[in-house]
Image (cartoon, helix red, strand yellow):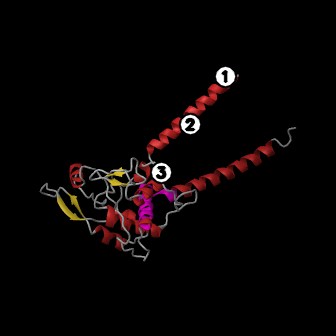
Amino acid sequence: MRRMLEKTLGGMALALALVTGAAAAEGPETLTRDWPQQGVFGTYDRHALQRGFQVYSGVCAGCHSLEYMAFRNLESLGYDEDEIVAIAAQYTVMDGPDDAGDMFERTAVPSDHKPAPFANEQQARAANGGALPPDLSLITKARAGGEDYIYSLLVGYEEPPAGVEVPPGMNYNAYFPGHQIAMAQPLYDGMVEYQDGTQPTISQMAADVTQFLAWVAEPKMEERKRTGIKVMLFLLILAIIFYAYKRRIWADVH
């Protein structure tokens, strides 16, 4: 019995060591924040989402695409129809073929998806020193740590510690696995002028664009949560009814 217990404890210790080692291999621990959309009753902060869209449009859109976002989706952020038409009109999209069989460019409309900054992967790599900027549509779902990781990455640029050499074309980031990342620091204090007057610090812009990207990845999150709460209430009421019915049926049975 003692030998079996020792083997069990030893196996548990080995498993814990493997899990700890795997977690350490994934990268440094990220910063954590209380995001308004988290939790059963969490909802998106519309003001933060609009600010985040400003940051994405002014800073990130030059390299990173949003393949799954159409301009009309911005209605969920609080933009009205005229504002969405004006935002879409800033872009041109390829359309066609026309009657002659040729493709042509036209001004984007709300039903269009936001065009990518590069025509193809090769062009994107050539413009970024061989690195391919990822599409950001699902980035908060695709990275372990979600919003915390994206936020940490954006605020984690700093001078490398003494004795750490960073190769040319790379940048030191305290929260990126390996600490060396090809993407240059994207955010600096004051680089975006917020329409609502919020102070555009690095931390503020990072938090806003992170929330915007969380919304892009899951725009129906609030609807899903409302539906889930309704289902749970329905099941609770149904359970109470069934329990009362069961008590009535078996009331005379001793």
Name the residue tied to disc 2.
16
Q: Reply yes or no: does residue 206 show up in magenta.
A: yes
Residue 32 point in image, percent of width and height: 51, 57
Task: Give the left or right position of residue 24, taking residue 92 as reference.
Answer: right
Quadrant where the C terminus sits is: top right
Report the amino acid beneath label 2. Answer: Leu
Measure the C-alpha gap from mark 3 to mark 2: 20 Å
Segment tinted magenta in the rendering: 204-223
- Mark 2–mark 1 distance (CA, rounded to whole Å): 20 Å
- Disc 3 on helix, strand or loop? loop
Compute the Cα span from label 1 to label 3. Answer: 40 Å
Count of number-bearing discs: 3
| Closer-to-camera residue (245/125) | 125
Q: Residue at the location (36% across, 74% down)?
A: 193
Q: Position of residue 160 (x, y in %)?
A: 37, 55
User: Quarter holding the N terminus?
Assistant: top right
In front: label 3 or label 2: 2
Give the residue type that dot 3 points to: Gly
| Labels 1 and 3: the sequence-earlier one | 1
Structural crowding at the residue carrying mark 3, measured as other residues with C-alpha within 10 Å and reported as few (<14), some (14–19) or many (≥20): some
Instruction: Report the residue marked by disc 1.
Output: 3
- Looking at the rendered structure, the secondary structure element under dot 2 is helix
Dots 1, 3 in contact, CB < 8 A: no
In-front residue for pair 87/158: 158
Q: Residue at x 49, y 42 (%)?
A: 23
Q: Is residue 47 above or below residue 105?
A: below
Tell me the crowding category of disc 1: few under 14, some 14 to 19, or many 20 or more residues within 10 angstroms, Cα based: few
Under mark 1, the amino acid is Arg
Which residue lies under the disc numbered 3?
145
